[in-house]
Amino acid sequence: MLKKIQLPNGTTVLLCPLRETEAVTVLIDHKIGSRYEAREVGGVSHFIEHLLFKGTKRRPSSLAITRELDRIGAEFNAYTSKDHTAYYIKAVRDQLPLAVDILADMLHHSLFKAEEINRERGVIIEEIKMYEDNPMMHLGDYFDQCLYGDHPLGWNIAGKKEIISTISRANIVKYFREHYHADRRIVTIAGNFREADALRLVRKAFGSESANGAPHPFLQAKPRTRAGVFVKYKDTQQVHMAMGAAAYPWGHPHAEAATLLAIIMGGTMSSRLFISVRERKGLCYYIRAGVSSFEDTGDFTVSAGVDLARVELAIRTIGGELKRAQRRGVTAEELKRAKEYIKGKVTLELEDSASIAEWYSKQMMCYGKTTSPEEKIKKFQNVTLREVAEVAARILDVKKYTLAVIGPFKDAKRFERLLRS
């Protein structure tokens, strides 16, 4: 059973004991991501994520950290999103003390050596180039840029090459000290462990740090989405495109209905768009629909890689399916299948300690409370056909969509006519 503890300094501790595994995962989450950055330090959250693995006072190099973790066969990594940054270690259960110690060491005693910063600049710039060179990987970033415009939600999480190449060590350390505070941290432990031992380790590692006490700096400006057609020229043999519009933020009453609608439209290999665009007309290799949610907004998106010679037919076909669902909703059978799909998906995804740790940490980060998988599935089961029809009527209005296209095109007008017709 999940247990939540609040340390005096504001750190939230979530303990999720699991007796059916020999593993344990420690995940440290901070509510700080790319959307909290000022323009001049864009990408710094992701940069810091890289640098925390580069050496501490007790483990003065990346090799010292990774060798210690490799010795015990641990899995370890980190990730930066627009909303939060997380670090985790998954190991056999008797290595819990080491996992907690290494993560605390990284978060409290990282050196931020100038030579490591300069070396990592090149690594991150190559990471940015890798995404930009691959239209399928770059499509999501480009669509966000088109949808949200010059707002942090529209900026690349990894930043711009020119900023990464010049940002100073002083600004990196300043940002880290301003945002990595105890009262903005969630420590989640899931797996096979004794609760008393785990809590003792967490109190020792994270309990002595003082709370920041200052209000969390919120978002720079309320995000606004923009409709329109945007084309990015790239000499490709396949056209990569994404279209969508604003949807719902975290915790919105229609969030579950929007997720079910996305599953019906393009979430599975038996979804409407997959059957219509790929199976019947052979216009694409991949096509998918999904929803993304943030603290104060969200979006519904359809993305696809389509045949260059038949891109206009693909857009018309996708638009036709979206309009049909907007006007007529979905069927009872489709909704039933989507509910069964989400039930199976959630259940299978939570089969190991790392997934469970991430589940509860994200629940606390996004909603300020934890919802069990069973409770979440029940919310999906309670969605009605009428709710899905209401959501479809609102978020499937193609004439108000943003369309982002990556391919050998320089003129957006041909696509504008298609989208608005």
Image: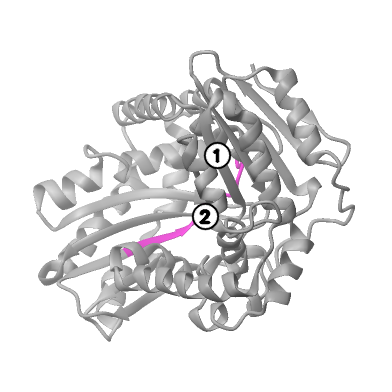
Picture quadrant of residue 132: bottom left
Frontmost residue, 299 versus 106: 106
Residue displayed at 88% across by 36% down: 8
Query: Which type of secondary structure does the marked residue at label 1 adopt?
Result: strand
Residue displayed at 86% across by 42% down: 208
Task: Where is residue 348? Give x, y as percent.
Answer: 39, 26
**Range of magenta residues:** 242-252
Residue displayed at 62% across by 69% down: 44
Which mark is on residue 63? Answer: 2
- The residue wearing badge 1 is 89
Which of labels 1 and 2 is toward the front? 2
Check residue 119 for magenta coloring: no
User: From where the camera sits, is residue 159 visible?
Assistant: no
Task: Where is residue 182? Give x, y as percent.
Answer: 79, 47
Task: Where is residue 118? Give x, y as percent.
Answer: 56, 76
In this figure, what is the number of numbered marks? 2
Amino acid type shown at disc 2: Leu
Nearer-N-terminus badge (1/2): 2
